[in-house]
């Protein structure tokens, strides 16, 4: 069966359909990972996007329950050069085609994904419509023009309820803006007592959880679409050690008074070189983002740039000059991609340990102690 992808600039790709029948619109982006299509499909940060894999052979190792990065995929379409319907892998439980069918996601194969990627690199990311319908190109164009880009992806992908993943060590409040499971996995592997909270949790509600540290997760969309989260971060800054990942990094920057902007075509893949400025060392990182922190906007803040992208020199890491808080634009939890940056989770836990030495009594406990002492003296 035929599927078609029409871009905002008028380019039409005709290929073979796989996955679900139907039609969807979204921002068309590309990912350069050679493996990891399952993690890409299930990364909530792709919510509302039509994803193209530049690796030409996709589906050959199938789908495994253990490799999901969220319970369900949120992408709006999947574009590949060649779709392999029969997986060949002992871990495969079912096929890519089945996964897309189960979740109503339209796939298209047998199109020139190299050409599509070059168009996106040249023009920048743009909207597209992916369909298995027989509609005329004019009809598709009309629907594409009339379609709105999503603005509420964080609310769609975040947990609705607070839940606990118990551990015996530090209590980390993980604010879920559309978090990949890998973040929770990294914290749990280190024995942390993780409390995952919804994206609209207030600073006061987080204080009631008595955290040792706060982790701001990755997530989809424009960081400026979640202003209440920026307020929450600014209220808790300095009070608790904080670590921001991807969207969390952008929210941390906005909370410190910096600005964010859209990248022409974003960074998506497992091969992005990032330079750590303190050591001049280069890390190959896993990335998936379309926005970045504006460099000039850092100047009037208390932020310091710690990492830059070696390809386009954009900001990849920040730290607060006076508070225990830092962030990275890339994915230390990998999944998919290189695991070289997982040490950042250890760095976060070390920051929490140092903070505890400097602030042995939590402000609230100190307040309580002072109140009790006052009450005893007056008695
Ligand atoms: N993976 C992420 O957290 C992405 C952050 C943000 N949605 C962006 O595209 O820049």
Image: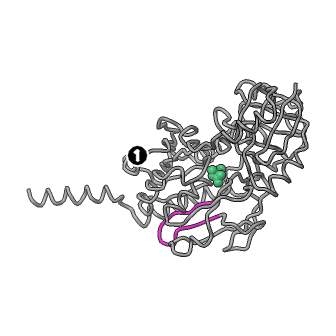
Q: Is residue 355 above or below residue 133?
A: below
Which residue is at 78% across, 52% downward?
Answer: 270
Task: Decide if residue 168 is on the left or right side of residue 209.
Answer: right
Task: Decide if residue 309 is on the left or right side of residue 370.
Answer: right
Which residue is at 84% across, 50% downward?
Answer: 117
Does the beta carbon at disc 1 come under 8 Å from ligand 1? Answer: no
Q: Does the segment drawn in magenta span residue 292?
A: no
Residue 76 is situated, as x and y percent measured from the top left of the image, at: 71, 36
Query: Is 92 in front, or is 357?
Result: 92
Secondary structure predominantly adopted by residues drawn in magenta: strand
Task: Decide if residue 278 is on the left or right side of residue 272.
Answer: left
Provide the residue span drawn in magenta. Answer: 317-328
Residue 67 is situated, as x and y percent measured from the top left of the image, at: 72, 36
Residue 110 is situated, as x and y percent measured from the top left of the image, at: 91, 36
Indicate the colouring scheme: one colour
Q: Quick one: which residue is furthest to the front in this view?
A: 138
Which residue is at 78% across, 36% downward?
Answer: 138
State the SS at label 1.
Answer: loop
Instruction: Tell me which corner region of the image, top left, top right, bottom left or bottom right, holds residue 42.
Output: top right
Q: Is residue 268 above or below residue 100?
A: below
Instruction: Tell me which corner region of the image, top left, top right, bottom left or bottom right, holds residue 51.
Output: top right
Q: Quick one: which residue is furthest to the left in this view?
A: 379
Query: Is 148 in front, or is 99?
Result: 148
Label 1 crowd (10 A; few <14 / some 14-19 / many >=20): few
Residue designated by label 1: 209
Which residue is at 53% across, 47% downward?
Answer: 192
Task: Decide if residue 162 is on the left or right side of residue 289.
Answer: left
Residue 71 is situated, as x and y percent measured from the top left of the image, at: 64, 32
Q: Does the segment drawn in magenta span residue 321?
A: yes
Quadrant that contains the C terminus: bottom left
Query: Is 195 in front, or is 171?
Result: 195
């Amino acid at each position: 069966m035929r599927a078609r992808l029409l871009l905002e600039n008028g380019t039409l790709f005709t290929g073979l359909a796989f996955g679900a029948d139907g039609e969807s619109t979204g921002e068309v982006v590309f990912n350069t990972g050679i493996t990891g299509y399952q993690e890409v499909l299930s990364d909530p940060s792709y919510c509302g996007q039509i994803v193209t894999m530049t690796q030409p052979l996709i589906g050959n190792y199938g789908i495994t329950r253990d490799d999901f990065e969220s319970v369900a995929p949120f992408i709006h379409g999947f574009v590949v050069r060649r779709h392999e319907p029969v997986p060949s892998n002992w871990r495969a439980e079912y096929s890519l085609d089945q996964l897309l069918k189960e979740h109503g996601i339209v796939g298209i194969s047998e199109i020139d994904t190299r050409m599509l990627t070059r168009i996106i690199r040249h023009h920048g990311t743009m909207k597209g419509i992916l369909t298995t319908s027989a509609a005329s190109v004019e009809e598709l164009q009309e629907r594409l023009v009339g379609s709105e880009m999503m603005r509420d992806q964080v609310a769609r992908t975040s947990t609705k309820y607070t839940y606990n993943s118990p551990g015996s060590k530090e209590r980390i409040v993980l604010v879920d803006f559309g978090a990949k499971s890998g973040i929770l996995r990294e914290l749990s592997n280190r024995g942390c007592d993780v409390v995952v909270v919804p994206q609209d949790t207030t600073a006061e509600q987080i204080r009631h959880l008595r955290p040792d540290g706060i982790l701001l997760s990755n997530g989809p969309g424009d960081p400026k679409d979640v202003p209440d989260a920026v307020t929450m971060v600014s209220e808790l800054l300095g009070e608790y050690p904080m670590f921001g990942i991807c969207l969390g990094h952008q929210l941390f920057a906005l909370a410190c008074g910096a600005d964010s902007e859209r990248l022409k075509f974003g960074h998506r893949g497992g091969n992005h070189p990032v330079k750590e400025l303190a050591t001049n060392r280069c890390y190959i990182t896993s990335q998936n983002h379309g926005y970045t922190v504006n460099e000039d906007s850092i100047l009037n803040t208390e932020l310091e740039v710690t990492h830059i992208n070696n390809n386009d020199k954009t900001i990849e890491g920040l730290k607060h000059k006076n508070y225990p808080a830092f962030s990275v634009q890339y994915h230390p939890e990998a999944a998919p991609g290189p695991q070289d940056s997982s040490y950042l989770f250890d760095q976060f836990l070390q920051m929490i340990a140092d903070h505890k030495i400097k602030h042995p009594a939590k402000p609230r406990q100190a307040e309580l102690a002072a109140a009790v002492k006052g009450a005893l003296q007056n008695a």
